[in-house]
Image: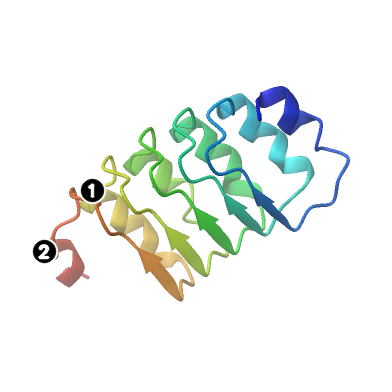
């Protein structure tokens, strides 16, 4: 699915959107999601989505977000998530997320957080408050 395909979804009132592996979707495509607006978004493996795309998610009512394997997402992208009502966040394998990004998660009402493979996150960050 490309950015054009995502734009064509704008007339739907989707609660759940599974975009995993949609390499043709970029930050521009993510901008079209505000018209849906989904509560659950799976964009794992969408390598063309960066921090700019994550900024477009900041106004969505997302409860569940799966960003695993999105190599273009860093601490700056995680900062855009801090105002969301997220209960579940999966950042597995997002190597651009470090201890600095974890600090932005403190305000989230998370029930589930999966950070496996985020090698930039240390044990020290987990003990700091």
The residue positioned 58% from the left and 47% from the top of the image is: 58
Q: Is residue 111 left or right of residue 16?
A: left
The residue positioned 68% from the left and 50% from the top of the image is: 17
Q: Quadrant of residue 90?
A: bottom left
The vertical placement of 99 against 87, above or below, is: above
The vertical placement of 22 against 118, above or below, is: above
**Marks 2 and 1, how far apart at CA:** 11 Å
Where residue 100 sits in the image (x, y, percent)?
A: 25, 50
Q: Secondary structure at mark 2?
A: helix
Q: Quadrant of residue 15?
A: bottom right
Residue situated furthest left in the rendering:
124
Please indicate, yes or no, whether residue 124 appears anywhere in the rendered image.
Answer: yes
The residue positioned 67% from the left and 59% from the top of the image is: 39
Check disc 1 and report the residue beneath it: 98
Considering depth in this image, is 41 or 86 the residue closer to the camera? 41
Q: Is residue 41 left or right of residue 112?
A: right
Where residue 22 sits in the image (x, y, percent)?
A: 57, 34
Which labelled disc corresponds to residue 124? 2
Which class describes the residues within 10 Å of circle 1: few (<14), some (14-19), or many (20+)?
some
Q: Secondary structure at mark 1?
A: loop
């Amino acid at each position: 699915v490309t950015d054009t395909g995502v734009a064509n979804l704008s007339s739907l009132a989707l609660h759940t959107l599974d975009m995993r592996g949609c390499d043709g979707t970029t930050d521009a495509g993510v901008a079209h999601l505000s018209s849906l607006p989904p509560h659950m978004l799976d964009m794992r493996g969408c390598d063309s989505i960066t921090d700019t795309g994550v900024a477009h998610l900041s106004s969505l009512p997302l409860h569940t977000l799966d960003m695993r394997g999105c190599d273009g997402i860093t601490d700056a992208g995680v900062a855009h998530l801090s105002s969301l009502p997220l209960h579940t966040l999966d950042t597995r394998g997002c190597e651009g997320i470090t201890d600095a990004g974890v600090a932005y998660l403190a305000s989230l009402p998370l029930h589930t957080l999966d950070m496996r493979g985020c090698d930039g996150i240390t044990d020290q960050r987990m003990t700091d408050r």
